[in-house]
Image (cartoon, grey):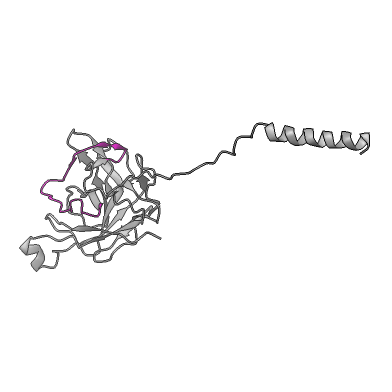
Amino acid sequence: MSKSSVKYLSLAALALLAASIAPTSASALTTQNYNSKGTVTFTAGTDTTGPVDPQDPETPVVPVEPPGVTPGGPTMPDNGLTIVYASSFDFGSHTVSNQAEVYNAAAQKLDDGTTRTNYIQVADNRGTFSGWNVKVTMTNFTTTNAALIANGHGTLTGAKVTLGDAEIQGDGTANPADRFAATTTLTPGVQSATILGATSGHGSGNNLLDFGGKAGATKDTAVKLSVPAGVAGAAKYTADFTWILDDTPAN
């Protein structure tokens, strides 16, 4: 065997020996995932703050009704959608007129002696964001005066009520109602179009629609009673207003 061959074999042997005594490298690290969860549950609200200030919707108030008026309204239903409050309208006392007349409603009174605009308040605490809408109807203005009834003046025939300068007040809610009618004229026995409503994704929390006017005013010039000439007798006439809330989303 030549010297070169011996040298080659010796180098090969040394390489093999070095490989056999070299430290073994560490095994590659492995990772493991374990998934846990966090949960929270919300239920439909079944209470409400009650009526709030139409000029400051985060402040609770106590409305005062016109003399002799006892409104009939629902309490918060189990599904969390309700009309919290709707103003009754006091058009005052006037001398009999044989001309067509327009009378402004008194402003909404509060128990602290201040006044606000007339308004309607809807609370939606269902947590569904599925929308809703409100319509309104009114009856004829009628009197219980037997003599006027007998001579054909027991009803203010042709009288109409206008709810004007309407504006949504949604402070305090992230998704206020987004549909309303700026002006609605009510004819006895005819249901209005939607005056306040919410499309899908809107209308949660407290939602108010106030009818113009200014805080502190004694008359709400946005709410008017129009009476034709020659129909009013010397008596008190009363009409019923029905505010209709359903869970159909507004358009």
Percent across and percent down for residue 142 are 15, 61
How far from the left and from the top, in percent, is residue 106?
Answer: 23, 44
Query: From the image, which quarter does the C terminus lie in?
Result: bottom left
Count of labels in the image: 0
Q: Nearer the viewer, residue 145 or 27?
A: 27
Quadrant position of the N terminus in the picture: top right
**What residue is at 40 percent from the left and 51 percent from the top?**
178
Horizontal arrangement in the rendering, residue 202 relative to residue 228 (left or right): right
Of 82 and 70, the residue lying toward us: 82
Q: Position of residue 67 (x, y in %)?
A: 12, 46
The residue lying toward the viewer, choosing from 148 and 193, is: 193
Q: Quadrant of residue 233?
A: bottom left
In the foreground, 128 or 167: 128
Position of 34 with respect to 44 (left or right) is right
**Per the image, is 102 magenta?**
no
Q: Position of residue 49 (x, y in %)?
A: 23, 41
Which residue is located at x 28 percent, y 44 percent?
220
Figure check: 13 above or below 242: above
Mark yes or no: residue 3 visible: yes
What residue span does the magenta drawing correspond to? 53-81
